[in-house]
Image (cartoon, helix red, strand yellow):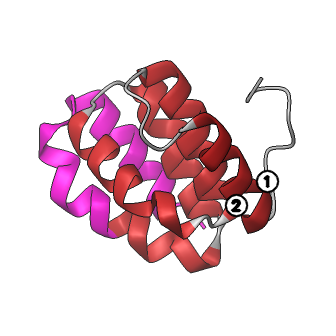
């Protein structure tokens, strides 16, 4: 379902989805990754703490890249992406760390 809806939603729509489906509290990494990518792309602030904890607890590029890309693509969350990376980077695999670092340093 999350893969088929628009990749950016209004904050109200994000809040409705989160309330109805409990997405921010999900423990399923696949669902959580899709949701947090959407939340980051949409600037949905209630999910920001969960984004921070998720990016600090996973190390697979499969999960890292979409969320960091969404954060980096929004000017308002670009600094947050850099802050999270600064704290979590050394727990990532060196290849994942290099890939995310290149993404964040790209224009």
Q: Which mark is residue 63?
A: none
* Nearer-the-camera pick, 54 or 105: 54
The x, y position of residue 22, in whole percent, is: 54, 38
Q: Which residue sits at x=72%, y=52%?
A: 16
The x, y position of residue 12, in whole percent, is: 76, 65
Label pair 1/2, CB-CB below 8 angstroms: yes
Residue 74 vertical position relative to residue 75 in the rendered view, above or below? above
- Residue to which mark 2 is pinned: 42
Magenta stretch bounds: 83-107
The kind of secondary structure the magenta stretch mainly shows is helix
Residue 79 vertical position relative to residue 71 in the rendered view, above or below? below
- Disc 1 crowd rating (10 Å Cα; few below 14, some 14-19, many 20+) is some
The x, y position of residue 58, in whole percent, is: 28, 31
User: Splitting the image into 4 quarters, where does residue 84 fall?
Assistant: bottom left
The x, y position of residue 81, in whole percent, is: 41, 63
Q: Which residue sits at x=22%, y=37%?
A: 57
Can you say which quadrant of the picture contains the C terminus? bottom right
User: Splitting the image into 4 quarters, where does residue 96 fall?
Assistant: top left
Instruction: State left or right for residue 1 relative to residue 28.
Output: right
Can you say which quadrant of the picture contains the N terminus? top right
Q: CA distance from mark 1 to mark 2?
A: 5 Å
Instruction: State left or right for residue 95 relative to residue 21.
Output: left
Q: Is residue 105 magenta?
A: yes
- Residue to which mark 1 is pinned: 8
- Disc 2 crowd rating (10 Å Cα; few below 14, some 14-19, many 20+) is some
* Nearer-the-camera pick, 101 or 62: 62
Q: Is residue 63 magenta?
A: no
User: Splitting the image into 4 quarters, where does residue 27 fall?
Assistant: top left
């Amino acid at each position: 379902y999350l893969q088929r809806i628009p990749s950016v939603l209004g904050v109200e729509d994000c809040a409705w989805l989160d309330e109805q489906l409990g997405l921010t509290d999900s423990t399923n990494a696949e669902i959580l990754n899709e949701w947090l990518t959407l939340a980051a792309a949409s600037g949905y602030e209630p999910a920001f703490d969960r984004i921070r904890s998720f990016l600090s607890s996973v190390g697979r590029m499969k999960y890292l890249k979409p969320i960091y890309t969404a954060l980096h693509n929004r000017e308002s969350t670009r600094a947050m992406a850099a802050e999270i990376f600064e704290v979590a980077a050394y727990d990532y695999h060196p290849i994942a760390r290099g890939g995310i670092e290149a993404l964040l340093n790209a224009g």
